[in-house]
Image (cartoon, rainbow, N blue to C red):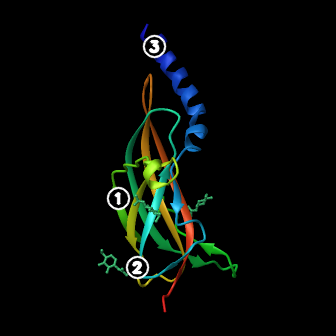
């Protein structure tokens, strides 16, 4: 009996892991700034992270938002090597709970995605190409339990000195 039960659990787990690419397609993303944006060193920037409605009920866990400078790789021009958010952040702007809220579109005129804004101060010393990234975790709630979802998301930005 116990054997059959664990078999059923294993089958259910396999079926769920087969769905993982689906749920990862519904992860969070940067709404602002956009990939390749130019931003000013030393400025305060509002980063908007969108969380489109997941297909299954989701319990949000945490998010960490940070930035690292990229290095020009040996191969030269327009080739950059950036640290992955999974490895390190040179600057950590926020680490804590993630609580994306759906805007009231009638009054705000924003789109339907739930989102959370984070105001960050771009370090004065950062120049050139940098990676802005976050690590995000949540749990999808299924009939058989809670299933963790992890993702690492990044964009690259160009940091310029203000005159
Ligand atoms: C950015 O925000 C911080 C904290 O609110 C403030 O002290 C600082 O003066 C702001 N910097 C700029 C360039 O507005
Ligand atoms: C969130 O940030 C975006 C991008 O800066 C801004 O357009 C929007 O007004 C902000 N929304 C709220 C509710 O703070
Ligand atoms: C940044 O995200 C892209 C996918 O948008 C991925 O291919 C790339 O490996 C990521 N870069 C780093 C340094 O994590």
- Residue 124: image location, x then y, percent: 41, 84
Quarter occupied by residue 26:
top right
Taking the image in four quarters, ligand 1 sits in the one at: bottom left
Which residue is tagged 1?
Answer: 95
Extreme-front residue of the structure: 106
Closer mark to the observer between disc 3 and disc 2: 2
* Res. 63 in view: yes
Verify CB contact (< 8 Å) between mark 3 and mark 2.
no
56 vs 101: above or below: above
Which residue is tagged 3?
Answer: 5
Residue nearest the viewer, comparing 78 with 157: 157
Mark 2 nearby-residue class (10 Å; few <14, some 14–19, many ≥20):
some
145 vs 97: above or below: above
Mark 3 nearby-residue class (10 Å; few <14, some 14–19, many ≥20):
few
For marks 3 and 2, the one nearer the N-term is 3
Quarter occupied by residue 47:
bottom left
* Residue 123 numbered tag: 2
Measuring 50% from the left and 48% from the top, which residue is drawn there?
A: 113
- Distance in Å between CA atoms under marks 2 and 1: 17 Å
Mark 1 nearby-residue class (10 Å; few <14, some 14–19, many ≥20):
some
Q: Considering the numbered disc 2 on the image, is that residue within a helix, a strand or a loop?
A: loop
Extreme-top residue of the structure: 1
Measuring 53% from the left and 59% from the top, which residue is drawn there?
A: 31
- Residue 83: image location, x then y, percent: 52, 68
For marks 1 and 3, the one nearer the N-term is 3
Q: Considering the numbered disc 1 on the image, is that residue within a helix, a strand or a loop?
A: strand
Q: Is residue 99 left or right of residue 72?
A: left
* Res. 89 in view: no
Residue nearest the viewer, comparing 54 with 4: 54
- Residue 68: image location, x then y, percent: 47, 72
- Distance in Å between CA atoms under marks 3 and 2: 55 Å
Closer mark to the observer between disc 1 and disc 3: 1
């Amino acid at each position: 009996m116990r054997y059959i039960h664990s078999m059923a659990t294993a089958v259910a787990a396999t079926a769920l892991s087969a769905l993982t690419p689906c749920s990862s397609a519904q992860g969070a993303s940067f709404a602002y700034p956009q990939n390749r944006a130019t931003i000013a060193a030393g400025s305060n920037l509002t980063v908007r992270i969108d969380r489109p409605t997941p297909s299954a009920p989701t319990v949000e866990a945490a998010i960490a938002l940070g930035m690292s400078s990229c290095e020009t790789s040996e191969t030269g021009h327009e080739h950059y090597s950036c640290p992955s958010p999974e490895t390190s952040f040179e600057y950590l702007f926020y680490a804590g709970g993630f609580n994306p809220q759906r805007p009231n579109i009638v009054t705000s005129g924003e789109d339907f995605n739930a989102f959370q804004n984070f105001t960050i101060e771009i370090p004065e010393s950062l120049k050139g190409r940098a990676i802005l990234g976050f690590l995000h975790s949540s749990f999808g709630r299924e009939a058989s339990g809670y299933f963790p979802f992890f993702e690492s998301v990044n964009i690259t930005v160009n940091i310029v000195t203000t005159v």
